[in-house]
Amino acid sequence: MSSEAPLVARAISANDPLPHVKNVILVMSGKGGVGKSTVATNLTMALSRLGFRAGLLDADIYGPSIPTMFGVGGRPVSMDGKTIEPLERFGIKLMSIGFLLEDPKQAVIWRGPMLHGALQQFLGDVNWGPLDFLVLDLPPGTGDVTLTLSQKMAITGAVVVTTPQAVATDDVFKSVSMAEKVSIPILGIVENMSYFIDPAGIRHELFGKGGGQAVADFAKAPLLATLPIDPSVREWGDKGTPVTKAAPEGAVAASFVALAEALLKVVGAKAEAMAASDGDDFQIDRSGGPGGKKRLPVAK
Ligand code: ADP
């Protein structure tokens, strides 16, 4: 697979806020702390390493982690007074509410309309340029951010992150059904923190097993990857260089690249299916409903 592949697996309409972005991938989870931002970060890095033009939008407005994970904290600038330039690190275009806060320790207390306004700006007013993939790190939970996004544009699909244990999967099931309700396809599941290999080479399933497969069965989507717990993931994340960049030849980086390759297969199949269909059999209404009344997008 190379960046030459004609990989467009979403319908880009005339009023799409991201007309030059071929694919929009949501990374979501029903639960915080399962490694959603880590997966979003390293998946984006892996896509870039495979030759694709990639960007990462930190849509986790209340708990932005991307500035820390990429070690960037500058202020985005505007060249023309209209559009905002994304920051760039390791070849990835980045935008996060964290870049706009005076004090990163400051809590963000926003009501829904402000949140949606910020999201709208991050989509429509950021000069993302042409991208093969824009990955969105969503806030945890079933949230209305997903609903807002689904109404603004066609989404290639979502990658759902879970950990193996039931306490995590219970919440992740909810985010799967939320995505289904707003007609966002689930591209696949990632089970993070699946196992730990100790220094003697023995494998330990610290959080049990089977959660990722259970979510995959529920979502009728493939289990794209089972990722190890590895202290280097956290250490490099805290130091501001994603592990896929810091230790590119290591086993952890390899598992993120394998995740990106598995995702590319799913996206490629979806792009082919879209090209083969006439596009008339499936439509999503993003108008918000007659008379401006809010309602869920309806697939016909
Ligand atoms: P979320 O976005 O779901 O809240 P994060 O990606 O911020 O979760 O991860 C939570 C913490 O766990 C971070 O400190 C991160 O470095 C660490 N972490 C995530 N995945 C792994 C992993 N596979 N191995 C070791 N540490 C991990």
Image (cartoon, helix red, strand yellow):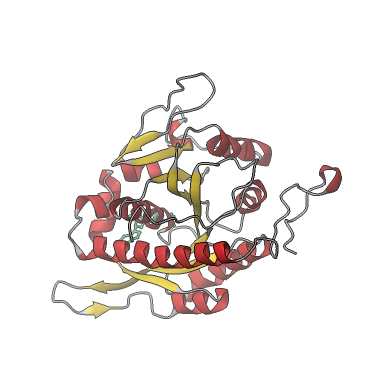
Q: Nearer the viewer, residue 9 or 236?
A: 9
Q: Is residue 106 left or right of residue 178?
A: left
Q: Is 250 rendered above or below residue 73?
A: below
Horizontal and vertical percent position of residue 66: 39, 44
Q: Which residue is drawn at 32% across and 78% down?
A: 205
Q: Is 255 rendered above or below residue 93?
A: below
Q: Is residue 170 left or right of residue 240?
A: right
Q: Nearer the viewer, residue 161 or 89?
A: 89
User: Looking at this rendering, what residue extends furthest in the left direction?
Assistant: 200
Res 193 seen here: yes
Horizontal and vertical percent position of residue 269: 48, 68
How many marks are shown on the rendered structure? 0
Res 64 seen here: no
Q: Which of 103 and 214 is in front in this view?
A: 214
Quadrant position of the C terminus in the picture: bottom right
Q: Quadrant of ligand 1?
A: bottom left
Q: Is 280 rendered above or below residue 18?
A: below
Horizontal and vertical percent position of residue 225: 37, 70
Q: Is residue 256 left or right of residue 173?
A: left
Quadrant location of residue 72?
Answer: top left
Horizontal and vertical percent position of residue 98: 44, 36
Quadrant position of the N terminus in the picture: bottom left
Q: Nearer the viewer, residue 120 or 37?
A: 120
